[in-house]
Amino acid sequence: MRVQFVLSEIRVGLRRNLTMTFAVIISVALSLALAGSAVLANKQVSSMKGYWYDKVQVSIFLCNKNDAKSDPNCTKGAVTDVQKKQILADLNKLPVVQHVYYESAEEAYKHYKEQFKDSPLVDSLTPDQMQESYRVKLKDPTKFDVVASAFNGRAGVQEVQDQRKLLNNLFNLLNGMTYVAWAVVVFMLAIALLLIVNTVRISAFSRRRETGIMRLVGASSFYIQMPFIMEAAFAGIVGAGLASVMLLIGRYFLIDHGLALSQKITLIDFLGWSDVISVLPLVFLAGVLIPAFAAFIALRKYLKV
Amino acid sequence: MIRFDNVTKTYPKQNRPALRDVSLEIEKGEFVFLVGSSGSGKSTFLRLILREERTDTGAVHVLGKDLARLSNWKVPQMRRQLGTVFQDFRLLPSKTVAENVAFALEVIGKPRGTIRKTVPEVLDLVGLGGKEDRMPGELSGGEQQRVAIARAFVNRPMLLIADEPTGNLDPQTSVGIMRLLDRINRTGTTVVMATHDENIVDQMRKRVIELDKGRLVRDQSRGVYGYQH
């Protein structure tokens, strides 16, 4: 294999098809950037869901020592063991309840740490500041009110929280956007693939003299096809590079500067740079493999070997 | 070297076979003319040897290999032992004479040292010494065909296939090309040449194989172009 020979073939081929190459690069870049954002949006949603979100519908937070001083619902002091047992017994008696989990303050601390691992808030918290809680899974997820009315205001209970109410709208919005993004990705990729097929066809036609001679003198089909596939892969890499830049710039302006969401919405732990960087290898892999594969398929049709 | 056993070949959407029950054998070191009018099956005969086409029935052996049993990925290896020359030269117009010849070695992955050594040698052999850096467009037809022959021969093939190599050349130039092919033949390379050129065949007095409508109608050692043609 003569690397230099193959490289010069690629250069000549790309230059001959400059406009087509640009079209391929741009469509690959846009579709990969969109796909990357969709993956990141998904990550954001799951990082916001926390440990209990998909498992339970109702959380009953119990008073701890700190709450006893500050929270009007906890004026009678921290929850006692007797109260806890009573609450658990009453919960199990309710027909709408399917399962009750108990989360101790230590466990709450652990789960919190996992969810907000990038946030500086974690360091200032200690386990005894966390609340104990009962996490309730309902047979019918809409029957939140039954549990709320039974336990709100009871001694030792700080708050009964509808787990879903808080974030459901935001999640629905994000999920909807993700679906739209994927649909657009599919169309963009289809455009990219058609462009690649066309580029290969033109390329194969304009080089038919060379490939004909290569066949005659016994060049292997690998050797004949390689420049075409490398051309597509090269355009794909450049596209993936552009897509990566778009993703990084996107995070920069959405979260840190420009829109600066991280300063406006402090409750949410936004994706860090490491999350964005972690999808880049995927972007590059897709950026190389998809065009190369498309070129390979196109060659079977347009290049006799 | 080449053996056809009852070879029949019909192209798709054609009623008449391009070759019909052809059997013959060509030995190592022979020089063979393949004659016949247009459409007689000469090109099909050559394409079968190059395995550009495959037979319907019957077997083609080239260099001791049954081409029907040769898997696709081994075909390039087989073709490296063959050289091919065409009526239309098939040179790359954007490459110099030397680059055109070197191209044949580059694409089969020969090391650069070998290429640098063998290309001038073979250009000397075909009588183009000193014209390495010319472009094909600057050369006469005969010289261009010499470049094509150099390219076909640079890998020292066992077998040289020539499809009407003098078809585009004037008689005097053609004689020069035939002398060159004869010299290549004398180095031990088998030459199979399809031609319409009556004078050449009659002068060279080599083995003549004649095809007519796909049938083998004459196989004559030291033959002439034809009796009535």
Image: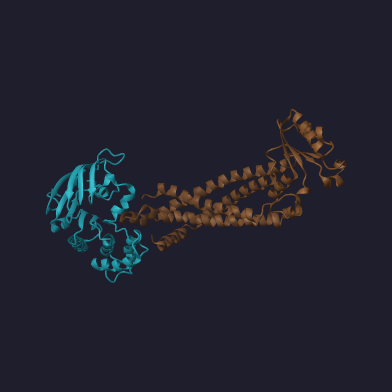
Chain colours: A brown, B cyan
Q: In the displayed structure, would residue A200 be above or below residue A2?
A: above
Camera-nearest residue between B33 and A225: A225
Image location of residue A126, percent across then percent down: 76, 51
Outermost residue, bottom direction?
A: B130
Percent position (x, y) of residue A243?
58, 54
Decide which of A58, A157 is in the foreground and name it: A157
Image coordinates of residue A54 in percent, x first then y, are 68, 39
Is residue B41 shown to the viewer in this render? no
**Farthest front residue?**
A81
| Residue at (22% x, 50% y) in the render | B64
User: Quadrant location of residue B180?
Assistant: bottom left
On the picture, is A263 further left or further right than A154? left
* Residue A275 % position (x, y): 63, 53
Q: Identify the residue at horizontal 37%, vertical 49% (top origin).
A: A304
**Occupied quadrant, residue A183:** top right
* Residue sitting at x 82%, y 42%: A63
How many numbered marks does the figure carry? 0
- Answer whether residue B151 is visible to the viewer in this image: yes
Quadrant in the rendering for residue A260? bottom right
In the image: residue B19, left or right of residue B223: right
User: Who's the residue at 17% across and 46% down the image?
Assistant: B24
Would you say B17 lies left or right of B113 here? left
